[in-house]
Amino acid sequence: MSTSTLRNRAKNRAGAITLLLTVVGYGAVGGVFLVPEFQALFPTLTEGTVDLLAHAIAAVNTITVVTLSLGWYWIRNDEVKKHAAAMTTSFGLILLFLGMYLPKVAGGGTKYFVGPDPAYYAYLVMLAVHILLSVVSVPVVLYAFVLGLTHSEHELRNRTPHRRVGRIAASAWLTSLVLGVVTYLLLNHVYDSTFEAAETAAVLLPVVPGV
């Protein structure tokens, strides 16, 4: 089967592909929190390894903020190829993030914020908004990306909702990433924290990506 034939089939099934990828993404993240059999696929990590992964995740998320911002800037200046390269890089970085985040959550335990009440409540608000935007942004980010891969520039501009969906996706994704990095800094560098190993940690809310 030729590449063009595959692309045409994917083009006509962009919604279905997005749905499938969304289910896979939600399933993988949900599995490390809720499914012991899935958690058991990952090794138990020491606190030192958890910290190392947290730092690496925060670095990846910070770079993603930069690449997303550049992608937004370039498309506003009609530099389509640069925009496409930036967004493809951003998508690759989010896959790298997942490759570190899943084992960190499944086998690494949980860090809890320790600080004065005003900072603690601000942290919780940012955490909640970050988690909400992380969940909401998945399907719109995937849909914008699938459209971008399967359609020509002319089609994207005139025959698809790529511009509108992409604007929503980039806004939600950027805000989520920035909040994730801020909460990482609060938890790991500005205030203290306590660590509870994976065997005893109670899973109530997802650990902040980058924390």
Image: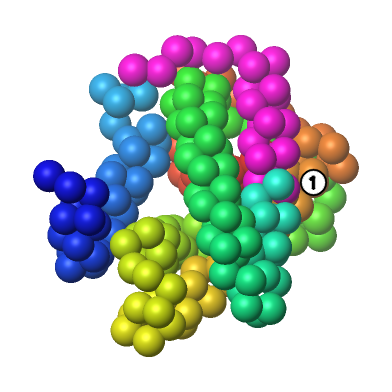
The residue lying at 30 percent from left, 26 percent from top is 38
On the rendered image, what quadrant is the N terminus found in?
Answer: top left
Amino acid carrying label 1: it is Leu
Name the residue at 79% across, 46% down: 186
Q: Position of residue 89 (x, y in %)?
A: 57, 48
In this rendering, position of residue 106 left or right of residue 122: left
Identity of the residue furthest to the left in this view: 1
- Mark 1: give few (<14), some (14-19) or many (20+) Cα within 10 Å: many
Say whether residue 127 is visible. Answer: no
Number of marks in the rendered image = 1
| Residue in the image at 56% along x and 43% along y | 93
Residue 208 to residue 31: above or below: below
**Mostly what secondary structure, the magenta segment?**
helix
Percent coordinates x, y for residue 10 in the rendering: 21, 59
Start and end of the magenta stretch? 40-62
Q: Residue at x 16, y 59 (%)?
A: 9
Q: Quadrant of the C terminus?
A: top right
- Name the residue tied to disc 1: 186
Asked whether 63 or 13 is in front, the reply is 13
Vertical arrangement, residue 79 with respect to residue 23, above or below: below
Left or right: 62, with 90 as reference point? right
Across and down, in percent, residue 178 comes to 70, 58
